Image: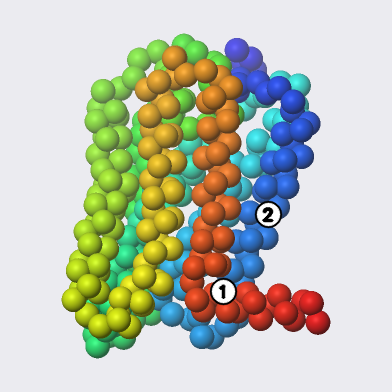
Amino acid sequence: MDIELNVTLLTLGGFKYRYLYFVIMFMVYILIICSNSTIVWLIVVQKSLHEPMYIFIAALLVNSVVLSTVIYPKLLIDFLSEKQIILYQACLFQVFLFYALSCSEFLLLSAMAYDRYVSICKPLQYPSIMRRTRVNIFLLLCWFLPAIQVAVPIAGNANTPLCNFTLKGIFCNNSSNHLYCVNSRELSIYGMVVLFNVALSPMFFILFTYIKIIIVAYQSCGNVRKKAAQTCLPHVLVLMNYSCLLTYDMVIVRLESEFPKTARFIMTLQFVTYNPLCNPIIYGLKMKEISKHLKILNKAEVL
């Protein structure tokens, strides 16, 4: 432990092949920013994409870029440093941003599922239900509800005594719970409530919504089934991808003592790489309107 002027430093798990990882992760980070920003830019400049579904997609991609920015800059600095350390207060702030933004993804996917449900199951009422004001309210709730709920356990742990100053991970996440001398039972219960509110509950809502959409599409004509497949499949793929990764993040804390360091490192890298890279690929290839504008953009660049 290094303590100076009441400043507590934590030591992160070390890295082998630091410079190789730096080059790889720096390229990945640039790719994440460029790929997500390109689609967001298309949605902003193309008036034909100024619809609720595409606004939610843009919000999801912006969320992915911000979430990556919470992790990658510090991670890249650590790859170049002999000692990987972080201020305890900075670690708590990273935990807060990481889980607030992660839970926002589930709520954004819930908003997308509701948008698709209204569009396919109640097409005549869609313009009146999905007004710009309601879309803006959904976006605010998707970002502020997780932040408010995640802030409570973070604030509760701010003054909790530490008995361990080595974090088994490459950034601050749930593994920080193993730093405390005693874990608060009340905060643990509250954490489970937050997990249900901003992750499990939205997931059940999304599954229920898409089941309803499938039933309606199956009973309707071919055009409705085609529309459901084209617009819902990308959201389902993103949900499956993100659910698996977040489940890993939750489970790894329970298995931390038995989990090999190298395997934990590789799986954590997958967590911070796959989702922000997969989202623009899935939406860029599977969403017909976005794919069309991307092709036009590529042709213009070639010319």
- Image quarter of the C terminus: bottom right
Q: Is residue 191 left or right of residue 276?
A: left
Q: Residue at x 36, y 77 (%)?
A: 227
Q: Is residue 21 left or right of residue 114?
A: right
Q: Amino acid at mark 2?
A: Leu
Name the residue tied to disc 2.
Answer: 31
Q: Nearer the viewer, residue 163 or 226?
A: 226
Q: CA distance from mark 1 to mark 2?
A: 18 Å
**220 shown above or below 270:** below
Tally of marks: 2
**Residue 99 image position (x, y, % from top left):** 43, 42
**Residue 46 image position (x, y, % from top left):** 57, 82
**Residue 289 image position (x, y, % from top left):** 51, 79
Name the residue tied to disc 1.
Answer: 291
Q: Residue at x 44, y 49 (%)?
A: 241
Q: Amino acid at mark 1?
A: Ser
**242 shown above or below 169:** below
